[in-house]
Image (spheres, grey):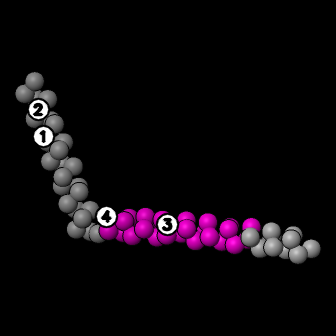
């Protein structure tokens, strides 16, 4: 029982050290920037598809 508690606290301590190391190296900031970049790409793709569909409908209506 005591050994299990010790291993949990040791595991938590190691995870915290890994988190602090990644914060210092800036890995978390880079991944957040990548996620923001990808999320801003989706509205542009949807807008482009909407423009293409509207253009095709306009051409079909004129012909």
Please state the horizontal and vertical placement of residue 40, each as a whole percent of the image.
49, 70
Residue 36 belongs to the span the image colors magenta: yes
Majority SS type along the magenta span: helix
Examine the structure image and report whether residue 38 is included in the region drawn in magenta.
yes
Counting residues from the start of the chain, the first of labels 2 and 4 encountered is 2
Displayed quadrant of residue 44: bottom right
First in sequence: mark 4 or mark 3? Answer: 4
Q: Residue furthest top?
A: 1
| Label 4 Cα neighbours within 10 Å, binned few <14 / some 14-19 / many ≥20 | some
Identify the element where label 3 is drawn. helix
The residue at which mark 2 appears reads as 5
Precedes in sequence: disc 1 or disc 4: 1
In the rendered structure, which segment of residues is drawn in magenta? 27-53
Answer with the quarter of the image where residue 3 lies.
top left
Q: Position of residue 29 (x, y in %)?
A: 32, 68
3 vs 32, nearest the viewer: 32
- How many dots with numbers? 4
> Residue at (39%, 70%) from the top-left corner?
33
* Place of residue 8 in the rendered image (x, y in percent of width and height, measured from the top left): 16, 36
For residue 9, the mark is 1
The CA span between labels 4 and 3 is 15 Å
Q: Residues within 10 Å of mark 2 (few under 14, many from 20)?
A: few
CA separation in Å, label 2 and label 4: 29 Å
Residue tagged 3:
38
Q: CA distance from mark 1 to mark 4?
A: 24 Å
Front position among marks 3 and 2: 3
Q: Classify 10 Å Cα crowding around label 1: few (below 14), some (14-19), many (20 and above).
A: few
Circle 1 or circle 4, nearest the eye:
4
Mark closer to the observer (1, 3)? 3
Mark 3 surroundings: few (<14), some (14-19) or many (≥20) residues within 10 A? few
Q: What residue is shown with label 4?
A: 28
């Amino acid at each position: 029982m005591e050994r299990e508690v010790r291993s949990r606290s040791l595991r938590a301590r190691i995870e915290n050290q890994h988190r602090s190391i990644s914060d210092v190296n800036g890995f978390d900031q880079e991944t957040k920037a990548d996620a923001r970049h990808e999320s801003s790409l989706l509205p542009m793709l949807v807008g482009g598809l909407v423009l293409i569909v509207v253009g095709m409908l306009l051409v079909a209506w004129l012909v």
